[in-house]
Each structure stands twice: as structure tokens, then as C-alpha cells.
Amino acid sequence: MNFIDDTPRLELFRLGNIPIRIDATFILVPIFLIGILQQAPLAAAGPAFAAIVVGVFLSVLFHELGHATLARLFGVPVGEILVGGFYGYARLLGNPRSTLANIIILFAGPLANAVLFFALWHLLGSPEVSSGGYFHYVERPDWMAEKPWLAYAAVTLARINLAMAIFNLLPAFPLDGGRIYRDIIATFASRVAAAKIIAGIGVIVGLWAAVTGFRIDLVLMLIGAQIAIMNWAILKQPADAEQL
């Protein structure tokens, strides 16, 4: 059973004749982000929460549009873009003509999130960014005091896009990084061996994310657990089974 294909979904609109759909799992986004209502200033909590939920949708959509745009540039048709709960999917109706083209298409998603991060970071006055992704200001732009709800949403979405850009480049399936590194390794080893190597690393990445998330973030814990399980399943597949 393909979970992505079996999830109820709704077509919202079309971009460049590509259907943009949202699936039922997106309801998890406001549920898991409800803690923002407790962290934000009382007067800003409601508008900030709504802006962040919409911003998460647009961030995932922009990520998938990165894949779709580059796929079309390389002559690969795109059947749909699906936005779900903390994940997205651009359905390509064919394969790129070369490994390099496939790697570029895969890299375009995280790059789109990096672009969004830098745009928001510049809007926020280019603060210093700590290793944990927190912002440290020498001087805040005036608009942040005038519109605290928008400032809170912009800071949160900047951090989310930074996390999306970095996390998606980790060597684990089904992340873009996992498929990128698999394609690189497959240039000097068999595709099956490359998939097994990435799956083995992916189990470690997933467990690390799950343990880290257990301490700091429920969403990261659930995503990490899912990654660990998926990569373990790939690792245990027979050598002649179809790989990602």
C-alpha cells in the first residue's frame, strides 16, 4: 500500500497547469504547532499562529515547486504537487536523462527553502544565527515592534525553512539528501549497494532525530522514528528488490 496515494486529498488550485493538492495529514500541522500559542505574546498568538500554519504550507509548496521547476527545465513532466503534514511530494511523470540532472532536481527543493530563509532573515534585519538556529539581535527593525505577531511568525518561519533546508540534505531516505548521495555513490558502485549504504546511514540519522526530538520537539521525534523505520525496511530488503 502506498500511503501517499491512499491519503484523502483536495485540489486547491493549479500553477503552470500543475495541480496543487493538500492531503488530510495537513491537519497535523496546526495540531503540532499549537504550542506556539503558549510561547507567543498573548496579543500576537492568534494572528501569529494562523500566519505560521499558512507559512508552513507555502514553505512546503515552495520546496516542491523547486523540484517541479527544475524537472520541467530538464524535460520531465510533473503530474501533481501534494502538500501534507510536514511533508510534500512532486510527482514526476518520467525520469531525468542523467544522474546529474536528477541530483540537480533533488537539490532544488532544499535550495528553495534556503532562499526563503535568507529572504526572511534579511527582512528580520540579518541577525546573528546560533548553531541551534536561534536569532540574536544587535538592533531590531522598527516594523518588528509595530507588528509583533508578524515578527514572531517571520522568526518562526525563518527557523523552519532553515531546518527544512538542512534536514532534507541529510543522508537518509526518503529525504532529498538520501537520494542525492545514493545517486553519487551509484556512479562507482551498484545502485542496490548505494541504496543499502544510504539506508544503513539513514537508520542512524532517524534514530538520532527521534532521540533529539524526544528532548526538544515532538514533530522531530515522529519524523525521526518514521525515517528510521523506513530505512530499516530498505536495509532488510533482498538484494534484488527494487530500491528507491
Image (spheres, rainbow, N blue to C red):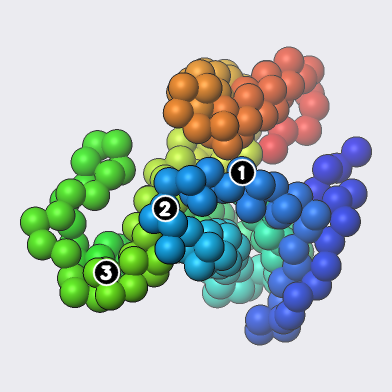
Across and down, in percent, residue 123 comes to: 27, 71
| Quarter in which the C terminus is drawn | top right
| N-term mark: 2 or 1 | 1
Residue at the left extreme, as displayed? 138
Q: Nearer the viewer, residue 43 or 230?
A: 43
Q: CA distance from mark 2 to mark 3?
A: 14 Å
The residue at which mark 2 appears reads as: 40
Q: Amino acid at mark 1?
A: Phe
Image quadrant containing the N terminus: top right
SS for dot 2: loop
77 up-or-down from 111: above or below: below
Look at mark 3 in the image and give the residue it sits on: 144
Left or right of residue 111, residue 231 in this image: right
Sequence-wise first label, 2 or 3: 2
Answer above or below: position of 153 versus 232.
below
Tell me where residue 48 appears, x and y as whole percent.
47, 63
Q: 105 or 49, which is in the foreground?
A: 49
Q: Quadrant of residue 14?
A: bottom right
Other residues around mark 2 within 10 Å, as few (<14) / some (14–19) / many (≥20) = some
Label 1 – label 3 distance at C-alpha: 25 Å
| Res. 160 visible in picture | yes
Which residue is pictured at 75% across the width and 75% down the height?
12
- Please name the residue shown 44% across and 57% down the image: 42
* Lateral position of residue 79 relative to residue 217, left or right: right
Going by the numbered disc 2, the residue's amino acid type is: Ala
Instruction: Check residue 217 in the rendering and tell me which mark sits there, or answer none.
Output: none
- Which badge, 1 or 3, is on the more N-terminal residue? 1
Q: Which mark is residue 32?
A: 1
